[in-house]
Amino acid sequence: MMENILYAPWRDEYITNKKIQGCIFCHISKHDGDDLHILYKDEHCFIVMNKYPYTPGHFMIIPHFHTDALEELDPKVWLHMSALAQKGVKLLKVGFGAQGVNIGMNLGKEGGAGIAEHIHMHLVPRWERDTNFITAVAQTRVYSTDFEKVYQKILLLIPKYLG
């Protein structure tokens, strides 16, 4: 029987990379640097590329305020996040060429959150046929383009759409 191997050398960084102590989102909130893949920051929120994206261009809107409970978030911050989401959808559709966008929040570990201690909103660009047999049969995602190139492209779009 033939063994199927899917090489993903970019995942090596996930396994071997030094882990940040405490909340990763609080760390990103307090720091700057291209290695953090920050797209945008203001007084209430920041936007960062998802380092292990569902599709190319997947980013997150995250409040600076550390909470795992959406109901504890200041309504002004929630409205600001929503406004950023609207602008982010336009960026992904018009600027990045996405045919659709999934927006979502997984609240709590039991709700599917990978980082449950700090709420965050996902914006996932979608295209017709962006999934195939490997997703359904092997529960495996194939990332078809270079992450850094996508980050740089979206970073250049930020002033126009979120400026």
Image (tube, rainbow, N blue to C red):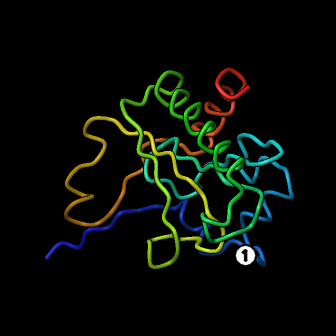
Local crowd at mark 1 within 10 Å, few (<14), some, or many (≥20)? few
Nearer to the camera, 44 or 122: 44
Q: Where 20 falls versus 27 (above or below)? A: below
Residue 130 drawn at (x, y percent): 31, 42
Nearer to the camera, 152 or 82: 82
Query: Residue at the spot x=52%, y=27% of the render?
Result: 90
Q: Where 97 falls versus 67 (above or below)? A: above
Residue 123 drawn at (x, y percent): 51, 45
Q: Amino acid at mark 1?
A: Lys
The quadrant of the image that shows the N terminus is bottom left
Q: Where 84 falls versus 34 (above or below)? A: above
Residue 157 drawn at (x, y percent): 64, 26
Which image quadrant for residue 97?
A: top left
Query: Residue at the spot x=36%, y=57% of the render?
Result: 141
Query: How many numbered tags mark residues here?
Result: 1
Q: Left or right: 130 with respect to 56?
A: left
Nearer to the camera, 129 or 103: 103
SS category of the residue bearing label 1: loop
Query: Residue at the spot x=51%, y=68% of the render?
Result: 107
Q: Which residue is mark 1?
A: 19
